């Protein structure tokens, strides 16, 4: 029996997919990368914003059309959010994402719809992923689930619930296992890393956790993904400066800079506070890389607010910036801030502003990338280009899936290798280098 899993959306979905795969393999299934040869197809969906939902639905029907004889299961965030009311005759099962231990029953056809309101006790939660779905040498490490921030636009708390931190010792043990299996890049993920521990320890415990993880033996590095700017942990910058195993890469989703918009979102910062945070990171760690996401079109954003956001982006000079248009999601606090007709008008204007912002960012990113030319870095190889003496990988400044890549000229490189390369050029959002080790 063969199973094909398509994982959409965020890194947390990939971790869930890896756990589903572990259950499947224990029940006699073998993973295939060819959906047309699968006996079971699982579409692990995203339900965060409208475009992600559309991609999830389109992927489901595309895979079903490619192999109509296979059993097909709709899983993940879209299933969790809408599965109770969803009429999808093509789906053999619809499976939420709270208690993944029920997956064997879904595979066996014992149930068609599974939605468990509560997550399992942390001691029962599985973390022994036997097969990783990303590139060799890299893995995601989830330290918490859900979120307590309740940003007005965000559907994540509706889907994944409130903050639910994993016990520190369980995270340490999983990290040790990943290191022992040869994982070099451990990407530490959560909806907000800085909030880790508030629910089970009564205080922020992310810095103590990173202290423990970065003290472990082995050849590995830690990358931090997603830190809410309003709860940025005290002491994190100094720890990252001190510990070489913590990559100086800060993913901070500021979303906006105008106070009028931020307050509507339920955020407490402003342009000065956020700029000061960026400057404090760079003053302590000059080699630091900062990525952010910015939202256009949130209710209340006008020309003045956009100009404030633009000045923020120009002044902060983020190394990487992703932007997206506000999606009007039902059951979120922001949903009733304006009607659909008004939303579509604002959406059209926001799309124009987004293009302007992205044009500004392209120049900033190109300029920021030039500082790597003439220096040497370790490169985690993701792909060997067949028939050529070159490979594609990433340096510390490039996170998986979202940033540019590094093209390395050299011989005898394969996926998962760590090679030393001298950076020689910037091409678009990518770097070029020559292997020197």
Image (cartoon, helix red, strand yellow):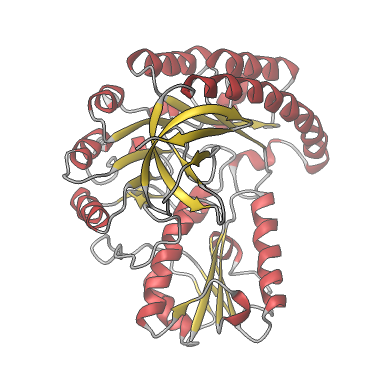
Residue 206 lies, in percent from the top left, at 28, 37
Q: In which quarter of the image is the C terminus?
A: top left
Residue 292 lies, in percent from the top left, at 52, 30
Residue 176 lies, in percent from the top left, at 21, 53
- Residue 414, quarter of picture: bottom left
Q: Is residue 393 left or right of residue 262?
A: left
Residue 279 or 89: which is nearer the viewer? 279
Q: Is residue 100 above or below residue 136?
A: below
Please tell me which residue is depicted at 63% across the width and 48% down the height of the picture: 49
Please tell me which residue is depicted at 27% across the width and 42% down the height of the picture: 197
Q: Is residue 245 above or below residue 108?
A: above
Can the viewer see residue 99 in this picture? no
Please tell me which residue is depicted at 23% across the width and 30% down the height of the picture: 243
Can the viewer see residue 20 in this picture? yes
Please tell me which residue is depicted at 46% across the width and 15% down the height of the picture: 273
Residue 212 or 302: which is nearer the viewer? 212
Q: In this view, does 324 lie to the left or right of 159?
A: right
- Residue 346, quarter of picture: top right
- Residue 324, quarter of picture: top right
Residue 120 lies, in percent from the top left, at 32, 65
Q: Is residue 36 above or below residue 371?
A: below
Q: Is residue 153 above or below residue 67?
A: above
Q: Is residue 293 left or right of residue 60?
A: left
């Amino acid at each position: 029996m063969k199973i094909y899993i398509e994982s959409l959306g965020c890194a947390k979905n990939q971790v869930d997919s890896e756990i589903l795969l572990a259950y499947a393999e224990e029940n006699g299934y073998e993973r295939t990368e060819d959906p047309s040869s699968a006996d079971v197809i699982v579409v692990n969906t995203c339900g965060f914003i409208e475009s992600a939902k559309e991609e999830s639905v389109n992927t489901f029907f595309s895979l079903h059309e490619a192999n109509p004889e296979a059993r097909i299961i709709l899983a993940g965030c879209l299933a969790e959010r809408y599965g109770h009311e969803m009429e999808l005759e093509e789906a053999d099962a619809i499976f939420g994402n709270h208690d993944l231990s029920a997956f064997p029953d879904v595979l066996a056809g014992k149930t068609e719809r599974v939605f468990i309101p509560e997550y399992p006790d942390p001691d029962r939660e599985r973390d022994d992923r036997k097969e990783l779905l990303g590139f060799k040498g890299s893995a995601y490490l989830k330290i918490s689930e859900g979120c307590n921030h309740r940003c007005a636009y965000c559907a994540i708390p509706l889907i994944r619930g409130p903050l639910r931190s994993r016990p520190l010792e369980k995270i340490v043990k999983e990290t040790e296992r990943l290191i022992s299996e040869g994982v070099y890049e451990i990407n530490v993920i959560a909806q907000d890393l800085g909030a880790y521990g508030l629910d089970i320890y009564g205080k922020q415990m992310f810095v103590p956790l990173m202290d423990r993880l970065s003290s472990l033996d082995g050849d590995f590095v830690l990358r931090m993904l997603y830190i809410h700017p309003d709860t940025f942990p005290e002491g994190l910058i100094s720890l990252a400066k001190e510990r070489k195993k913590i990559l100086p890469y800060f993913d901070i989703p500021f979303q906006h800079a105008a106070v009028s918009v931020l307050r509507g979102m339920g955020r407490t910062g402003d342009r000065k506070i956020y700029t000061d945070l960026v400057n404090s990171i760079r003053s302590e760690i000059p080699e630091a890389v900062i990525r952010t996401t910015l939202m256009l079109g949130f209710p209340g954003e006008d020309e003045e607010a956009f100009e404030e956001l633009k000045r923020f982006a120009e002044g902060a000079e983020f190394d990487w910036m992703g932007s997206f248009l506000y999606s009007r999601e039902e059951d979120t606090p922001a949903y009733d801030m304006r009607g659909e007709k008004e939303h579509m008008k604002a959406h059209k204007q926001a799309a124009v502003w987004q293009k302007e912002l992205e044009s500004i960012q392209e120049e900033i990113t190109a300029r920021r990338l030039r500082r790597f030319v003439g220096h040497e870095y370790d490169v985690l190889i993701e792909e060997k280009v067949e028939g050529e003496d070159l490979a594609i990988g990433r340096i510390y400044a490039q996170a998986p899936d979202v940033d540019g890549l590094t093209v390395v000229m050299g011989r005898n490189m394969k996926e998962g290798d760590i090679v030393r390369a001298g950076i020689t050029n910037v091409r678009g959002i990518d770097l070029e280098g020559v292997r020197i080790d």
